[in-house]
Amino acid sequence: MTYSVNLIKLFLRRDDHLFKLNEAERIKNVWNLLFFLLVLTVITYTWSAWLGLGSEAISVNMTGWNRVEYEFRKIWFVIGRAAYALIIYLFILFISSFFYWLFNDVSYKRLFIIQMNVLVIMLIERVTWVPLVIFAGIDWYVSPFSLGVIASYITELDWVIYFFGAISLFQLFVIWYQVKCISWLSSTKKGWIWTGVIFWHILLWAGTAALSYYDLFLLQIIK
């Protein structure tokens, strides 16, 4: 049986397509989608960076630069975000898939097909940040879709706010989606799948919080 990957149908008709994916002896359309998602990821991150998302470190120092210096640094910032997009792309598709593969009896290729849809969800989440920043002046970690808003009322510790800011409705949907898909494809007990997926996401949220907390410091070092 040959299965041609269709990410939209894998979302809308999940059970049917998971069955076909699990039974498939040959899987097509993988490389085309990998290239498409790579381009989409880089465009999303560079576009949001050009609009100013995450450029606080540059904006803070712009009064000490002339117009040419500011635009030059902005271009380097966008290039840096493009490189960051490539890292995110590789991490979500291949590193996360490898982690799940270690603890579940599912083929690696099927897992990173599931991760393709996870990447799409995360890109959609990032796009929702743009109007919040531009029109409402709301940073990603206090998005109305995240727990960062609640955390900001409870504590003033930046790392804690960033951590809970990384926990959003999109991320919770990703956890549910991954568990559903892995449970269908794997014979691993569902409780262990939930534990593994949640543990991995806690590590990702902690990493996101750490990167956000030290972002300004790192920029000051490399500038």
Image (cartoon, rainbow, N blue to C red):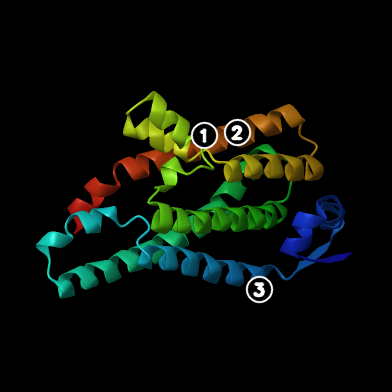
User: Disc 1 to disc 2, how far (Cα)?
Assistant: 6 Å
- Residue type at numbered disc 1: Ile
| Residue 221 in the figure: left or right of residue 39 | left
Q: Which mark is residue 32?
A: 3
Q: Which mark is residue 198?
A: 2
Mark closer to the observer (3, 1): 1
Residue 219: x, y in percent? 24, 53
Residue furthest top as drawn = 154
Q: Quadrant of the C terminus?
A: bottom left
- Residue sitting at 32 percent across and 29 percent down? 157
Q: Residues within 10 Å of mark 3 (few under 14, many from 20)?
A: few
- Residue sitting at 16 percent across and 73 percent down? 67
Q: Are marks 1 and 2 in contact (CB under 8 Å)?
A: yes
Residue 163: x, y in percent? 43, 35
| Residue bearing mark 1 | 202
User: Disc 2 to disc 3, how far (Cα)?
Assistant: 30 Å
Q: Quadrant of residue 188?
A: top right
Residue 65: x, y in percent? 12, 66
- Residue type at numbered disc 2: Ile
At mark 3, the secondary structure is helix
Q: Nearer the viewer, residue 12 or 145?
A: 145
Q: Nearer the viewer, residue 100 or 115?
A: 115
Residue furthest left as drawn = 64
Residue 76: x, y in percent? 28, 68
Q: Residues within 10 Å of mark 2 (few under 14, many from 20)?
A: some
- Residue sitting at 36 percent across and 39 percent down? 210
- Residue sitting at 79 percent across and 61 percent down? 9
Counting residues from the start of the chain, the first of labels 2 and 3 encountered is 3
